[in-house]
Image: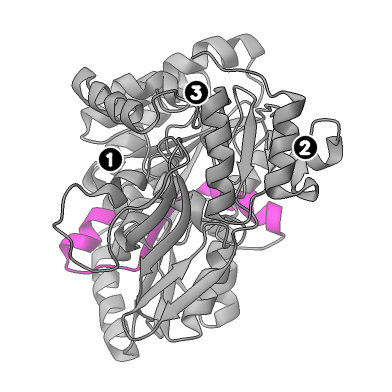
Amino acid sequence: MNFNKITPNLVEAFATIVGQEYLVLPADREGMVRYTHDETEDLRYLPEVVLKPKNAEEISRIMRLCYENAIPVTPRGAGTGLSGGALAVHGGVVLSMERLNAIISIDERNLQATVEPGVITQVFQEAVISRGLFYPPDPSSRGSCQLGGNLSESSGGPRAVKYGVTKDYVLNLEVVLPTGEITWTGANVLKNATGYNLTQLMVGSEGTLGIITKIVFKLIPYPTQNLVLLVPFRKEEEAAAAVSKIFTAGIVPSALEFMEREAIEWACRYLGLEVPMAADERAHLLIELDGNDMDLLYKDAERVYEVLETFDVGDILVADTEKQKEDLWRLRRSVGHAVKSNSVYKEEDTVVPRAELPVLLRGVKEIGERYKFKSVCYGHAGDGNLHINIVKGDMSDNDWNNKLPEGIKEIFRLCVSLGGTISGEHGIGLVQRPYIGIALSEVQLRLMQGIKQLFDPKGILNPGKIF
C-alpha cells in the first residue's frame, strides 16, 4: 500500500470542513494522546491528524479528499476495542465519531430506533428501557463503548446467549464509502430478500469497507423480572461441562458466564468487593434467568438446581436484592480491567461449540504449562466464547515476544479443531491478523479480499487490519 503524507493544504481543507476546534494535530499532545491507543495491550500509534465530523456530509467530503490524495483513514469510536482495530498504524487521519451521538428516533409502534454511531451503548439501552423496550447486546464496556464500534466488531456480551449479538438487531445502515459516496444498505423491515445483504456485510467488517453514520435497530419488549445465581464449582472443567447440560435440560438463561477462581479474586480486589469462596472452589458460573413471570423463573431455577446436583458444587448464592445483582454483574464486567491492572497481558477471544468448552479449557492450561505462561479464563460460556487472558508475570521479554506467539497458535489450532474459531466478538483487527490463516481457508480469504478491493480500491480505509 502506497499512502501519502498529509500536507498543510490538506490540513487547511479538513479544518474548513469540520472547523478548527474539531481538528487535533500531534503538536497538541494532551488532546492527541487518547487517539493513539485503544484497550489492546499497550500499543501506541500516532495519527497525523484527528478529525471530529458531525454528520455524513462532512465525512463524505473528508473521504473524497482522502481518496483523491491516497491518505489512510482509521474510523474510531470510543477506543474500547481489544484487537487494535481503531489504531492508526499507517498514520493519516483518525476519524472520530464522537460528535455523531444522537438518538434520532424511537419508533414504539414498529419497535425500531434510529441512532447515530457515537451513542454510548448503555445510554441507548436506558433510553429504550424507559419506553418499555429492549436492546439486548451488552458488551462489558457498555458504559463507555459506542454503538458504531459495536457494529464494526459485531459485539456480543453476556446476553447474546439468549438474545443474539449486535448483528441480529441491525435492520439498515447509512454508510459513507471510501470514495465519499453515501448510501443506505437495506430497508427498515424485518424481512428483506432483495439482493445481497449489504447490511450484514457491513456489520463486523471492522471499519474496512465503509463508515457507518446512521443505524436502524430492531427492538423487543423489555423483560421485567430476573433471577441471578452465582454457582461455585470445585473443578473448572465441571463448571464448563455444566453449561451444555443446562441447555440440554431445556433451559435458556439470559446469561451464563464462566469465571475461574483467579478471575473473581482479581476482580474483587480491583473493585473492593467480597465474594465468599471456600478454599477448594475453583470456578463459578454466573447464571441469569429473565422474563415477565417470577413464578416461571423460579420453576426454571429449580430445573437449573436439578442439573447442578449432578456436579460437585458448593453453596449457591441467589442474589436477593438489586444491589447484590448489580455487584455480581460489576464483578463480571470488571475482570478484564482487573487483569490489566495486575500485569501486561494478551487477551484471546476464543469461541467453540459450547459442549467443547471443557476440552478447550483443559487444552489452554496444558498449552500454558508447555510454554510457561499463566492464563486467567472467563467469558460467555453460554455461547462457547472463552476469554483467555495470558498474563506476562515473570516471563522474560524474549519468551513473551518470541515463544508466546507459538503458544497462541496452538490455542487457536485447538479452537478450530473443536469446530470453533479465533474470535467470537473482539474481531481480528491488528493483533489477530497474523493468525487469521489458522481459521480461514485461502478461498475464504480470497473472497474477503476481493470484497475489500471492490469497496476500497485504494485500500485507504482502516489499512493494516484483518488481512
Q: Which residue lies under the disc numbered 1?
A: 352
| Residue type indicated by callout 3 | Gly
The image quarter in which residue 54 lies: bottom right
The answer, for residue 326, to whether it is visible in the render is yes
Identity of the residue drawn at 36% across and 20% down: 410
Q: What amino acid is found at the position of numbered circle 1 in the picture?
A: Val
Q: Nearer the viewer, residue 135 or 250?
A: 135
Q: Residue furthest left?
A: 193
For the residue labelled by badge 1, is the local secondary structure a helix, a strand or a loop? loop
Indicate which disc, 2 or 1, sits on the residue closer to the N terminus: 2
Q: Classify 420 as above or below 252.
A: above
Quarter that holds the C terminus? top left
Within 10 angstroms of label 2, few (less than 14), some, or many (20 or more) residues? some
How many neighbours does mark 1 have within 10 angstroms: few (below 14), some (14-19), or many (20 or more)? Answer: many
User: Relative to residue 100, is residue 232 drawn left or right?
Assistant: left
In the shown orientation, is residue 114 left or right of residue 353? Answer: right
What residue is disc 3 on?
A: 464
State the residue position of label 2.
Answer: 33
For disc 3, the neighbor class at 10 Å (few under 14, some 14 to 19, many from 20) is many
- Of the image marks 3 and 2, the number of the one nearer the N terminus: 2
